[in-house]
Image (tube, rainbow, N blue to C red):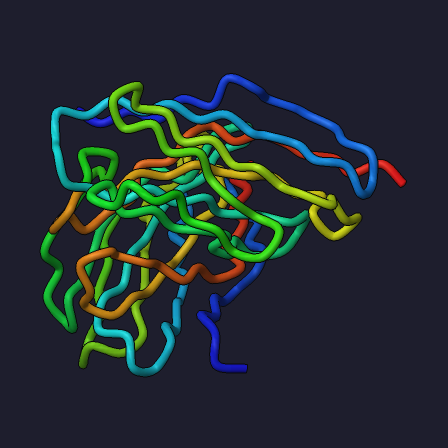
Amino acid sequence: DTGVSQDPRHKITKRGQNVTFRCDPISEHNRLYWYRQTLGQGPEFLTYFQNEAQLEKSRLLSDRFSAERPKGSFSTLEIQRTEQGDSAMYLCASSLTRSYNEQFFGPGTRLTVL
Amino acid sequence: AQTVTQSQPEMSVQEAETVTLSCTYDTSENNYYLFWYKQPPSRQMILVIRQEAYKQQNATENRFSVNFQKAAKSFSLKISDSQLGDTAMYFCAFSQTGANNLFFGTGTRLTVIP
């Protein structure tokens, strides 16, 4: 399978714990995006990488969130001191550098904070 | 700021019939892209169809077509000959030319009834 993959698919944690999610983009895609999707809503943009450089961050990305993409391949999204409001589906997407920005999505990581 | 509105939270259609999902958006930009994404239950989001704002011709992909009305800022999706596999959440999304993120609507849950 050459699509976008995410790990884990589900994560249950207690409030205050740290969690880390991983995204493996389509191999030739140099752009990688993180989105958050809460129940009944569409995905909301969090951050974007061009190769290994994090070029844009949404105001939704609080100081407790950090994302990395070492070597421009896979990416990790870490949430520190989780809060119940962090419960959501975290989606990763990747794309080539094209003007029409067609993004390919992974299956998501569903986070539940108790 | 760009906004995308989907005013139909839920819709249903009989198998083999035609259904139209509505989407309106707000932007001050002249060049942009519009997308319809499909998110089947417990499966990842996939692109259904894309429209470039500078093209007057409506995009079509097999049973899927759009009605793009630029002046009205309207972008509806028509699904012909509906199939059971079309049951999913459908998200309308907007991307400004040169931008790095997608703005999504809240989605329409479509159920195809056998």
Q: Nearer the viewer, residue A24 or A8?
A: A24
Can you name the residue that lies furthest to the right here? B114
Q: Is residue A43 left or right of residue B33?
A: right
To which quarter of the image does residue B87 belong? top right
Q: Quadrant of the C terminus of chain A?
A: top right
Q: Is residue A6 left or right of residue A70?
A: right
Q: Is residue A32 visible?
A: yes
Query: Which residue is farthest front?
Result: B57
The percent position of residue B3, horizontal first and vertical second, equals 29, 24
Using the rendered view, name the quadrant where residue B5 is placed. top left
x and y percent of residue B31 in the render?
14, 40
Q: Position of residue A107 (x, y in %)?
A: 53, 59
Image position of B31 (left or right of A81): left
Whether residue B22 is situated above or below residue B40 in the rendered picture:
above
Q: Determine the image quadrant of residue A51.
A: bottom left
Residue closest to the eye, A91 or B106: B106
User: Residue, x 15% and y 66% (percent of image)?
Assistant: A50
Please state the horizontal and vertical placement of residue A60, each as a whole percent of the image.
Answer: 25, 34
